[in-house]
Every structure is written in structure tokens, then in C-alpha cells.
């Protein structure tokens, strides 16, 4: 099969778009140049939807809107959505000893109606297939059968590859069993082993019919019971195998959903976790409140320093020192303290003079002495008011005297400590304020992504995945038990048939079915193993060529292979196994998957298109050019969606290999990315005939440096 052209109406960004694809065997490359958000992935989805229906859409179409997103919601409005693909089939027939080639053209049209509202409910799609000839188009019944024969659904991801999902056969984020299942399903489907699977089922059915005859031979006896039990077991086996296949598919589907949630969570966390940011914001506000309280206390302490005795003492120290010197001088002269009055009063109370004479009341001489002393006291009280003030000043000023010279700097030291503590708290408060503003800006700029909701959804998917894994294990155990029991019962049945006269013919028929089954299984395994080895060898050769790894020159990557367990393995020096997800760079991982897809297509000798979205992402230089050259050479038809950056450096290869090149532009990119106004207000993809080397008024884009200069100005 080769794709010839495609048309889309109202399919997301593709409101009205036509594409042509090169079918020239000498120039088999079609390049669709488009920047990000310019419809590349949408075209990939549209092509698959046309051929495979809703099952090919993300999430199998559930909740996936098809009509353009910028259409205003209008209850009751339904719009038609169509995707048309024309393709060519080439068949070869032997006629009179001569190989003749026949080419037939077909057109497949898939359509659906969708509500233009928040629900975006969509009718079941209808598909029609037409054979194209010189006289027109003739409808063909059962279009899915023809399409599935040429492009089996199991190989959809082989023929239509999203570069960002190109690692699905090797990525470490999914279970080993899922990767093996993908590789195994792709290999067996492309090698046509489904025909042998169908033959095995037919032989089993024939064996079941022969087993029913055995029931008639041994009516009512042990042979009848065994044959009946084998019949029941065959029915159970078919059911178990159907359920097992479903469990495997469901496990793979939910495993992919878990992986998808992991990517969404990781992408959201790169931009910021709103829940975590909210908690950080609350913590920051609490910290600011605490620092404000500490800062207020520090300001009070700072203010109190200027009302303390210490600052007055330090400021008045020169004056106080001179006053203290004078007071000390008066003290040394005996004028301070004024102790005369207290001593005289003490003598009157003791009724004895300092000299030893009596001062008793009633004694004439004592009375005379008392009157004299009292007169001295009265005269002293009247004349010594200044001396009393000086005495009070002397004793009252004692606490203001600095005893040690080092105490004179006490207030300054305390002031320094208080100011440093206050300034330190202020710095922390300013930093907390800046952090708060940054968190608020970051929180405001976050998209409305519920990370906790994503985690809850992931947990639900993981629970579902684990449930199907448990179911898978249970079914495999039951099937294993049925096989063992079946072998034992078949042995007993065959022995009993030999003992019956009528059993010989039935036994012969059973032996024939068993022999045919052995042949089919042997052929299945032989084809699988032999073709698997061919795919493995070719994949290794293509992969090493793509990445420029020469084992003879000491390259780190020595070889790659597909094991008999359908694991894609990469080896380094000394046959050390390399983990593709951790030990290979992005370019090598992408090259490995593309090499597997190309090898599989080549070995199967199936003529089919390779449609790849952004295959050269994460690559540059030699590896990028090598991948492109190799993919062109190994493909029967190659359709690439390339960004401008992917094309850079590969222009000469495209010059030589491309039969069709055109450019797609999203007018919504004006004015930030587009130089000129396309004059289109609708959000839609526009096509121009510019190739990989040219630009027109429509697709002319700003260069990065121009954007930077414009922003700076």
C-alpha cells in the first residue's frame, strides 16, 4: 500500500486541508514542514482515524473532541467531520510463467457528526471504500476487511509513528511484559503469522468434532465421560484464552495510561505543583508573621536602650567624673558625710557624752551639758542644709559611678548586639517577603492543573492494571492446569479407543489432527525464530549505521538484538547489557526504535508507508543526517512531519530524496512567530507550496535572534 493523497474537513485544526504524497519509487520521500502547533500530530491522528476509526484516536476516541476548539458552543448544532484517504495497492500474479504487476487505486472516506458543545458528543463514524478507475468510483463492501489485510491494526504504530512515542518498544516506563507483547505482536502480525493462528484454531475445531465421535463410541462408559470432559475443557480453554488475550490487552492499555499519567504529572511538576506551592505559600506567610513579631520585639528593645540609665551615664560621663572628684574631695575633708547631728543625738539618748561625762536628766551638770549639745544640734540643722544636699548627692550618685573602666563601653556593646539582632531579623523578613512574592507570581502563572487529581487518576489506572495482571496470572495458571489434565485424558481416551472396534478410525482421525497441529506449531515457531533473527540482524545493522557506531573502532554501543523472548537489547563493551532508557541518549533511543520498525517492514517484504511525526527530535549533526538517509533508503514510502530545526542541516538529503515538499502554517502564531499577518482569524492550518529551503509571505517566520531583539526593545 502507498498513500496518494488525503483531505480533511473540520478535523480539529484541519478545517479544510488537502495533502499529496509522493509515490515515486526513486523519490519516495514526502516532507511536510511545520512548526510546533501547526497540525503535524493532528494529521497523523486524522490519517489513522480515516483507516481505523475511533480505536486509533487517543484514548480510543473517548472524550477526544474532533471539531475545531475555537468554535463557539452552540447547543443543538452538529457539524460533519470527514477524513478522506486515497491509496494504491500493488499485487503480483504469475500469468503464463510471467510475473505481472497490477496497481489498483482506492478511496476511503470516514465521516461522523459531532455536537459543538462542552460534551462534544459524536455519532458513530461511518466508512465507505471506493475502487477508483477511469470511469469513476465503485463502492466496495466491507471496507475494513481490505484495509485490515493491507495495514493490520496491530501494526498501526509501526506504519504511523509519533516520534515522541517512538520509544514504545523499548521505553523503561512500561512493564517488560508490555514491551515484549508489543514487539511480539508487531513481528508476528507483519510476518503474516495470523494465517497460521487461524489454521491452528481450525484444526482444534476439527479435533473437537472428532472427539464428539468418541463420545458416541463409548456411550455411557468411561470413554464417554473422558470425551465429554475433554469437550468441556476445550470450551473452557477457548474462553480462558479469549479472556487471557483480553486481560493482556487491558493490562497493556492501563499500563500505557499509567505511563501517560506519569508524564503528565512530571510535566505539571516541572511547571510547579500548585498544592505544594500553596503549602509553601502558607508556610511563608507563617514565617513572615513570626519574623514580624520578632522584629517588633527587637524594635522595642532598641527603643528601650535610649530610655535606660546606661545611655545617660555614658553620655554624662565627663561631667559626672568631675563631680565625683569634688565629692570625694569633700569626703576626704570629713565634710561628707555630715555625721555630727546623728552622733550628738545618739549621745543624748545614751545619756553619756563622748568624753564620758554624764548627760542624765535630773543631774544639774548633766542637764547643763544636754542643753549645750541640743543647742549644737539646732545650730547644725539650721546651718548645714547645703552640706546635707551634698551628702545625699554623694551617696545617691554612688550607683552612677563606673567602678571598672571596661564598664564604660557596656551600653555601646548592648546597642551593637540589639542592632545586629534587629538588622538580622529585618534581612530574614525581607527575604521572606521576596519569597512570598515569587511564590504568588509562580502560583498565578501555573496552569489550572490538578496534580493531586492526576495522582488519583494514576492510582486508579494502576489498580486496574494490577487487577488485570492478577487476572492474567490466574488464567495462565488455569490454562496450564487444563493442558496437563487434557494430556492425561487424551492418553486415556486414545487407550480406550484402541480397545474398541469402532475406535480405530476415530483414533486415526485424531492422530491426523494432532500431526497437523504439530506441523503448524513447528512452522509457527520456525518462521518466528528464523524471521525474528533476520529482523534482529537487520535492526542491528541499521541501528549501528544510524548512530555511526563502529564496534571495530571501540564504540560504546557494540550491537543490538531482539531476544527469543522478544526483548530489544543493546550491548556495550564486554557484552554488558545497556539499559536503553538510562544508558542511551535520546538520539540513540529514537534511532533504535526506528531501526526496529524499518527492519520489520523490510524483512516482511510488505510495501507499506512509514508515516513518522518529528522523527529527528533529540538528534543533531551526523546522527540526524544518518537517520534521515537510512530511513529514506529502507522505506518503500516515507512521509515525514519535520520542524524547521529538524530540517536544518539535512537540506541536501531532502533535495535528493523528496518527491513532495510543502509547508503548513498556523495563523495564530502571528505576530510572535510569524512575520506577516496571514489575514485569517480562524484557528486553522494553512498550506503553502514552500519547500524546505524557501519561505513566502504566509510562512515567513521570525528567527530566534529577531524575536530576542524585538522582546528586548
Image: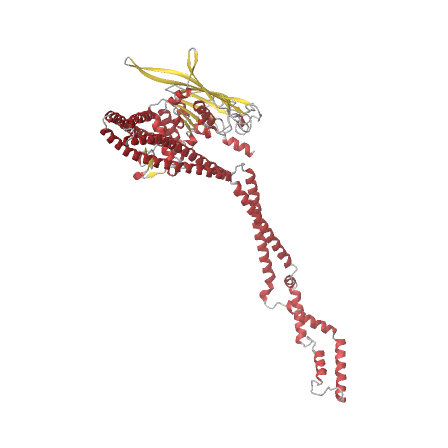
Query: In the figure, 418 relative to 28: above or below?
Result: below
Q: Percent position (x, y) of residue 133? A: 41, 12
Q: Percent position (x, y) of residue 637? A: 38, 22
Decide which of 636, 659 is in the foreground and name it: 636
Query: Residue sitting at 66 percent across and 73 percent down?
Result: 329
Indicate left or right for 354 with 159 as reference: right
Q: Percent position (x, y) of residue 166? A: 40, 31
Which quadrant is home to the N terminus? Answer: top left
Numbered circles on residues, count: 0
Q: Percent position (x, y) of residue 659? A: 41, 20
Decide which of 93, 43 is in the foreground and name it: 93
Find the residue positioned furthest to the front: 220
Indicate left or right for 342 with 246 as reference: right
Indicate left or right for 552 with 695 as reference: left
Q: Is residue 692 visible?
A: no
Find residue 365 and report its image quarter. Answer: bottom right
Q: Is residue 707 visible?
A: yes
Decide which of 359, 243 is in the foreground and name it: 243
Find the residue positioned furthest to the top: 135
Decide which of 229, 294 is in the foreground and name it: 229
Which quadrant is home to the C terminus? Answer: top right
Find residue 175 and report its image quarter. Answer: top left
Q: How is the image coloured?
A: secondary structure
Amino acid at each position: 500500500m502507498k498513500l496518494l493523497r488525503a483531505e480533511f474537513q473540520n478535523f480539529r485544526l484541519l478545517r479544510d486541508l488537502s495533502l499529496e504524497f509522493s509515490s515515486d519509487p526513486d523519490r519516495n520521500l514526502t516532507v511536510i514542514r511545520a512548526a510546533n502547533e501547526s497540525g503535524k500530530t493532528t494529521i497523523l491522528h486524522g490519517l489513522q482515524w480515516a483507516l481505523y476509526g475511533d480505536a486509533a484516536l487517543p484514548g480510543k476516541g473517548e472524550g477526544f473532541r474532533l471539531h475545531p476548539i475555537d468554535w463557539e458552543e452552540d447547543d443543538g448544532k452538529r457539524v460533519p467531520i470527514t477524513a478522506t484517504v486515497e491509496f494504491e495497492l500493488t499485487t503480483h500474479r504469475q500469468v503464463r510463467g510471467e510475473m505481472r504487476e497490477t496497481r489498483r487505486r482506492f478511496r476511503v472516506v470516514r465521516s461522523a457528526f459531532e455536537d459543538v458543545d462542552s460534551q462534544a458528543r459524536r455519532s458513530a463514524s461511518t466508512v465507505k471504500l471506493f475502487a477508483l478507475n477511469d470511469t469513476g468510483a465503485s463502492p466496495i463492501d466491507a471496507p475494513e476487511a481490505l484495509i485490515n489485510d493491507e495495514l493490520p491494526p496491530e501494526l498501526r504504530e509501526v506504519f504511523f509513528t509519533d516520534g515522541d512515542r517512538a520509544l514504545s518498544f523499548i521505553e523503561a516506563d512500561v512493564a517488560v511484559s508490555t514491551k515484549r507483547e508489543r514487539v511480539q505482536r508487531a513481528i508476528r502480525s507483519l510476518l503474516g503469522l495470523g494465517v497460521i493462528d487461524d489454521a491452528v484454531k481450525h484444526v482444534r475445531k476439527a479435533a473437537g468434532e472428532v472427539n464428539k465421535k468418541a463420545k458416541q463410541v463409548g456411550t455411557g462408559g468411561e470413554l464417554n465421560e473422558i470425551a465429554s470432559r475433554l469437550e468441556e475443557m476445550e470450551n473452557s480453554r477457548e474462553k480462558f484464552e479469549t479472556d487471557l488475550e483480553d486481560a493482556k490487552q487491558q493490562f497493556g492499555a492501563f499500563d500505557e495510561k499509567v505511563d501517560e499519567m506519569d508524564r503528565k504529572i512530571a510535566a505539571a511538576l516541572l511547571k510547579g505543583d500548585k498544592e505544594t506551592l500553596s503549602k509553601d505559600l502558607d508556610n511563608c506567610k507563617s514565617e513572615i508573621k513570626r519574623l514580624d513579631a520578632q522584629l517588633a520585639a527587637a524594635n522595642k528593645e532598641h527603643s528601650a536602650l535610649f530610655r535606660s540609665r546606661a545611655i545617660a551615664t555614658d553620655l554624662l560621663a565627663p561631667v559626672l567624673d568631675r563631680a565625683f572628684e569634688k565629692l570625694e574631695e569633700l569626703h576626704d575633708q570629713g565634710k561628707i558625710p555630715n555625721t555630727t547631728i546623728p552622733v550628738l543625738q545618739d549621745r543624748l539618748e545614751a545619756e553619756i557624752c563622748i568624753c564620758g561625762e554624764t548627760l542624765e536628766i535630773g543631774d544639774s551638770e548633766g542637764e547643763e551639758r544636754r542643753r549645750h549639745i541640743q543647742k549644737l544640734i539646732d545650730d547644725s540643722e539650721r546651718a548645714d542644709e547645703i552640706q546635707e544636699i551634698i551628702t545625699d548627692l554623694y551617696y545617691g550618685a554612688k550607683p552612677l559611678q563606673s567602678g571598672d573602666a571596661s564598664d564604660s563601653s557596656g551600653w555601646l556593646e548592648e546597642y551593637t548586639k540589639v542592632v545586629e539582632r534587629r538588622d538580622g531579623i529585618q534581612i530574614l523578613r525581607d527575604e521572606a517577603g521576596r519569597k512570598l512574592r515569587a511564590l504568588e507570581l509562580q502560583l498565578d502563572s501555573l496552569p489550572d492543573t490538578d496534580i493531586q487529581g492526576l495522582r488519583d487518576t494514576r492510582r486508579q489506572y494502576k489498580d486496574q492494571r494490577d487487577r488485570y495482571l492478577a487476572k492474567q496470572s490466574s488464567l495462565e495458571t488455569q490454562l496450564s492446569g487444563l493442558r496437563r489434565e487434557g494430556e492425561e485424558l487424551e492418553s486415556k481416551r486414545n487407550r480406550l479407543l484402541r480397545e474398541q472396534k469402532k475406535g480405530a478410525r476415530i483414533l486415526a482421525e485424531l492422530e491426523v489432527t494432532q500431526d497437523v497441529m504439530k506441523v503448524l506449531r513447528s512452522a509457527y515457531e520456525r518462521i518466528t525464530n528464523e524471521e525474528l533473527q533476520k529482523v534482529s540482524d537487520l535492526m542491528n545493522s541499521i541501528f549501528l549505521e544510524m548512530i555511526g557506531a563502529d564496534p571495530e573502532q571501540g564504540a560504546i554501543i557494540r550491537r543490538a538484538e531482539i531476544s527469543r523472548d522478544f526483548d530489544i537489547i543493546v550491548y556495550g563493551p564486554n557484552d554488558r547489557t545497556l539499559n536503553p532508557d538510562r544508558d542511551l541518549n535520546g538520539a540513540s533511543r529514537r534511532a533504535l526504535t526506528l531501526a526496529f520498525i524499518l527492519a520489520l517492514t523490510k524483512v516482511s517484504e510488505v510495501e507499506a508507508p512509514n508515516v513518522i511525526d518529528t522523527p529527528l527530535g533529540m538528534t543533531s549533526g551526523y546522527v540526524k543526517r544518518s537517520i534521515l538517509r537510512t530511513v529514506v533508503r529502507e522505506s518503500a514510502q516515507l512521509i515525514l512531519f519535520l520542524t524547521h530545526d529538524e530540517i536544518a542541516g539535512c537540506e541536501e538529503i531532502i533535495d535528493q530524496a523528496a518527491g513532495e515538499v510543502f509547508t503548513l502554517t498556523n495563523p495564530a502564531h502571528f505576530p510572535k512567530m510569524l512575520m506577516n499577518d496571514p489575514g485569517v482569524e480562524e484557528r486553522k492550518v494553512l498550506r503553502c507550496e514552500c519547500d524546505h529551503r524557501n519561505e513566502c509571505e504566509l510562512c515567513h517566520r521570525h528567527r530566534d535572534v529577531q524575536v530576542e531583539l524585538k522582546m528586548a526593545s
